[in-house]
Amino acid sequence: MKALFKVAGLAIAVSLSAMAVADSATGKGIQIERVFAFNGAMPTGVTVTESGRIFVNFPRWGDDVPYTVAEVVQGKVVPYPDLKTNVEDPKNPAAGFISVQSLVADGHGRVWILDTAAPRFSEPKAGGAKLVAIDLASNKIVKTVVFPPEVMLPSTYVNDMRFDFRVGKEGVAYVTDSSVSGPGAIIVVDLASGNATRRLSGVKSTSVDPSFTPLIEGRPALVTKNDKGDAGLLSVASDGIALSSDGQTLYFCPLSSRHLYSVSTALLRDPSVSDTELEKAVIDLGEKGASDGLEADANGAVYAGDYEHNAIRKRLSDGQWQTLVEDSRLLWPDTLSIGPDGYLYFTANQLHRSPGFNDGQDKRVKPYSLMRIKIDAKPAQTH
């Protein structure tokens, strides 16, 4: 069925699964609603704009991905901003989308696209990894920031991002490098100049926890094989990221870890602060469960997926954690996004069931899901 919601005079149309609503896990009295079912490629990212538009992306990891960025419109996914932009231009890597990992609506009339330029986790194509801003009124690209070569290692996999338009001439972006073979990092990008720096590169807080073994559906997960056929864990560095509503604190976590970390954004941006000093300023906020995506709201809370327990968790402003929902349908909660309607939206994409982790067998069962839960909170401010 379809439902129409009005938020601050804005109409938000979503397709809701009646069955999902009827048999929702209530945990704390919170219902899980399926907003959209994906029967094609596997999604990772989702973002909901201030006017209620919903965008998703599909990285080119091996599925048939005709377009890597899409908008959910009247019960369908359509390429965004158009099909042509979703095709790589070999002569100009900065032009077309190569393989998009995440997207974020900035609350300022734009949606930003993060292109890894690294399909199948390959070495990123030179000049292809970029941030692309699309104006929501015209649906046209209005800015492209190519990551400079000094922050792009052969192992770099740019994963997720957050924005703050209160600093700098045009604002700043914080981007995680979630490398699977090299150092993790936080990449700080000045959006006006395009200058970028790698911060916290290879330190404990952005690196894989060597003692971490993920357990999902009762067995070790993310088990893959190298070129020699030797089995081991896919280890992923800094991944999830969230920015406090006042812009002063950045939260982040490696995917291959259960810990949440935070750091002062003022220190992160200050080139006079050495890497050693910055590392000492990082705060280990303790265990939160194993997470892919993170998000923050306007009230000081941080939300995290817990992919080992099919759950969504909330860290209150006093540091206490709550489990909002835990449900067998939340198979690998990936990206989180707070909409203007007071809902937390998230994808559930069964990543751990992918062929690469199951001796070439695809154990994913379509459809993949875009879900939401009511949290009665607004998105964190960015300006």
Image (spheres, rainbow, N blue to C red):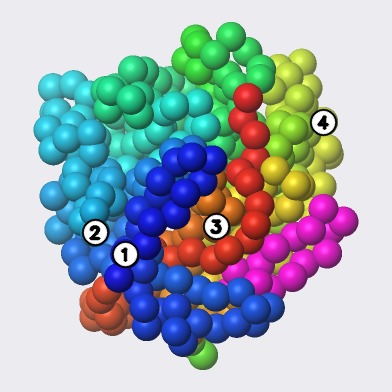
Name the quarter where the N terminus is drawn: bottom left
The residue indicated by pointer 4 is: 277
Quadrant hosting residue 268: top right
Q: CA distance from mark 4 to mark 2?
A: 50 Å
* Secondary structure of the residue carrying numbered label 1: strand
Q: Residues within 10 Å of mark 2 (few under 14, many from 20)?
A: some
Type of the residue with mark 1: Lys
Tell us which disc is closer to us: 1 or 2: 1
Tell us which disc is closer to us: 1 or 3: 1
Tell us which disc is closer to us: 4 or 3: 3
The residue indicated by pointer 1 is: 2
Q: Residue at (69%, 73%) from the top-left corner?
A: 323
User: Would you say the residues marked 1 and 2 are in contact, meaning their CB atoms lie under 8 Å apart?
Assistant: yes
Tell us which disc is closer to us: 4 or 2: 2
* Residue 156 position in % (x across, y down): 44, 40
Tell us which disc is closer to us: 1 or 4: 1
Residue bounds of the magenta highlight: 311-324
* Residue 114 position in % (x across, y down): 39, 37
* Secondary structure of the residue carrying numbered label 3: strand
Q: CA distance from mark 4 to mark 3?
A: 38 Å
The residue indicated by pointer 2 is: 75
Residue 209 seen in the current view: no
Q: Residues within 10 Å of mark 4 (few under 14, many from 20)?
A: few
Q: Earlier in the sequence, mark 4 or mark 3?
A: 4
Type of the residue with mark 4: Glu
Type of the residue with mark 3: Tyr
The residue indicated by pointer 3 is: 343
Q: CA distance from mark 1 to mark 2?
A: 9 Å
* Secondary structure of the residue carrying numbered label 4: helix
Type of the residue with mark 2: Gly
